[in-house]
Amino acid sequence: MNATPSALETAANAAWSAIPTLMQEKLSQAAISSPVVLGLSTILTLFFTWLISLSIYRIWFHTLSKHPGPLLCKLTSTVWAYHFTKGSILQWEAKQHKKYGQTVRLGPNRLSFIDPRAWKDIYGHKFGNAKPNVKNLDRAVKNLPSGRLPMALEPTTAGHAAQRKQFNPAFGERAWKEQEPLVQKYVEQLMRRVSAEIEASADGETVVDIATLYNFMTFDVMGDLTFGEGLGQLETGIESSWVPAVFVMYKLLNKRSVIKAYPLGGFLFDLFAPKGMLQDSAKHMQHCSDLIAKRLEKGNDGRPDIFGHVLKQPGDTISRTLMNANANMLMVAGTETTATTLTTVTHLLLRNPDKMEKLLREIRDVPDRSSLNSQVVQRMQYLNAVIEEALRFCPSGQVGLGTQREIAPGGNQVCDDFLAEETEVAVAAWTMSNSSLHWKDPAEFVPERWLLDEVDYPAYHKYDNRVAQAVVYFADPLFFESLLRPHELHRMRREAILPVFATPLIMSREHLYEALVQRLLARFRAAKGTGAVLTLGHAFRCLAIDLTCTTNLGYDFGFVDVEDFEKDMFNIARTLGRMNMISRHIGHWFFAVMRAPARWAKRAEPVSPGMIRVLHFRNLIDQAVTEQHRAATTNITSTSEKTGGNGGDDGFKSTVQHILKSNLPAHEKELTRVVNEVWLCINVGIDTEGQAIAFATFMLLSHPEELAQLREELAECEKRLGRLPTYQELKELNYLNAVVQESFRLNHPIAGRLPRTDPDLEIQYRNVVIPRGVTVSVSTYDIYLYPTIFPDPHRFQPKRWLELSERKRLRKYINNYGRGTRSCVGMDVANMGIYLNLGRIFAPSAGFGLSLHDTLYERDVAFDADFFGAFPKSGSNHIKATVI
């Protein structure tokens, strides 16, 4: 199709062509009449005249002037080149299309499209006299004779067709079937590595760099498919030095191609480019050449790899130069794109547990999962819908220089416009795939949109569907199940209960916790002067139970009011801790024991004192959770009176309600699972918090000078405020803070942390090599008593925490509540209990004092056994005191 230029365009072009001639005539006249006048000012005047004329032409008279776009982009390609080389091109293009529409001018001679018709017009085959558009490479590359560039970059139609004919058998359906065992070998290696890391974790969770593992797999696979041997990365867990070189090569190719479009750009780039980058690029090229030579020595050995199929072709095979070039391109284009898509699939499933559950349900519905192969996988509708949706989110094979085209000689039609030859065009695939012009809720992950047969998506174009095929090929359902279920389940469960322990919510419930502390203080006041001996550990554990029950259920069971503070509570805590530690080594039967008949508990009582009380306490929790679960699932309002509790607050949402309203799958909201979750939330906060308060109280009572300094600080605070300080105000008291930190250091509420094992590989830590299968852990006990870190470590010295510089030095060693994804969600509840107790008991306004009674540090207090929490010696007299 030919377009007739308008009279205005003809006049503009003629005027523009006349400007250089006119400038040359004026320049000659000036030089003849007055050579002196022809100075710098004249040159600058002529230059700016040319520049202004060029700008006027490009803005108003250029053949692309009617297309909208940023003003600076109409004048120069530098803006586009800047974003391309910086890596921000996708976001920048999306911003321009959102502002200017489906066709945007991003350079003087460059158009970007998100009109679905552009797919066919720019990249499709041409018919009749029309010629296909040309891949937009730099001039030096485009002028190379045919037979020097790989198939993906070959600009000529004949050269591309000739190479494609040679490689087609290697990518056909028959070849895929032959290559399946080879690919499956690496998928299984990936599954084994991830599964082993998860299973080796004592708590079912570990951190896996899945993006790196996906790159390991795709490079191993492509190395084997291309050269007949893998890189061995999945097997060893060590990244090949070649992989970084490939990524450098990819970046170098893109940046150099853009910069060479400018005068002297290529020369300057080669001159000033980092030598390491150029060396990595040369390393990649040489490595490909060496491996191709090694593969060719084997000849046609029957292997189903890519060059095995090429060598089987009749007639003359492709040249060695083209083999090297295509091997180079396969290792660049066939690895990172697939790994990126797999990473996207995994990320989207992890962020959308409901979609993940649908996928796992489809996987579980496969009749014979042992016979899974690529044909079965390709028939799994939801899995393929997930992959299509992931490719929409991240069309990794449809970005970069590979999508750039120049309009063919003679011009071509794109959408509604006839564009002149050498006009640079491209489809902004990422922008189109995430545009609200073409998709409903484009920011939402909705695989279901691909399950509607009657719906067509013209904005989605499988520009190169080999990426999708490879993802289907690699996306073994068993792998997704083994990866997502154990690792994701902890995150999902944690997110479900996090709102219960959110800091603003805990702060808003301070009045509930204050009321419990005051009930305890009332018990102490009642014992003043009576000579009654109180077991402080028991009292504070009772308080901790009521605090955690209030947090999770909305009411307490009144343990703090029980006579003699439920003397069996220590045995309960010790029994629970011992059972948990034993179950780690011989199977997790912990929850099963919790449901044992009472007669079993009576028989076990001599061996595990407190077993009956443990089961009684568990029954209380079971009944409460069952009532709340029934009320929540039947929309019945549950009140504290129904369960016989003490108090509660209006609008309170329990842990049960938060779990039921979370994004957890349905089976995670069943009664048994919810009971176990709430029981765990309550149980883990009992002994650690109760023991921490009791230990801090003992240390203060046995160190009169430190106690006097704390009382003085509390007295000054109350006097300044004219009332009792709040939790937040107590946390701001320097000496109280120092007492809490020092008590935590010496108390060891949890002495051992998160054991880990690598069953396959040795662990290198500095100069130490840890053999595979050996369990390693971080022990707060050893850290807190290490004299190099904490001088005079066994001495109670709160003052060590008073200096800001010293606190900063010690901060990295503190691990009172854990770190990372396994940090304690209830740390705010624990801290509030600790600060409110110490701030009230030792305040002058308390109206009483405590005096230790028959309590010795080594016999009754010192850490002796680690049953998840720290316990003193068996037969301990515990921390006892009288009220004075």
Image (cartoon, rainbow, N blue to C red):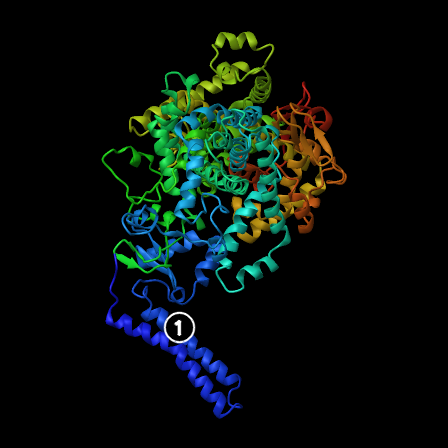
Quadrant in which the N terminus appears: bottom left
Residue wearing tag 1: 54
Query: Residue sitting at 45 percent across and 18 percent down?
Result: 619
**x, y (%) of residue 756?**
61, 27
| SS at badge 1 | helix
**x, y (%) of residue 662?**
38, 33
Quadrant in which the C terminus appears: top right
**x, y (%) of residue 789?**
73, 40
Query: Residue sitting at 47 percent across and 19 percent down?
Result: 618
Q: Which of the two residues, 227 or 787, is positioned nearer the viewer here?
A: 227
Confirm whether residue 400 shows in the render: no
Q: Is residue 328 left or right of residue 127?
A: right
From what the image shows, is residue 564 above or below residue 226?
Answer: above
Question: Which corner quadrant of the image does residue 285 belong to?
Answer: top right
**x, y (%) of residue 261?**
48, 60
Can you name the residue that lies furthest to the left here?
A: 454
Confirm whether residue 834 shows in the render: yes
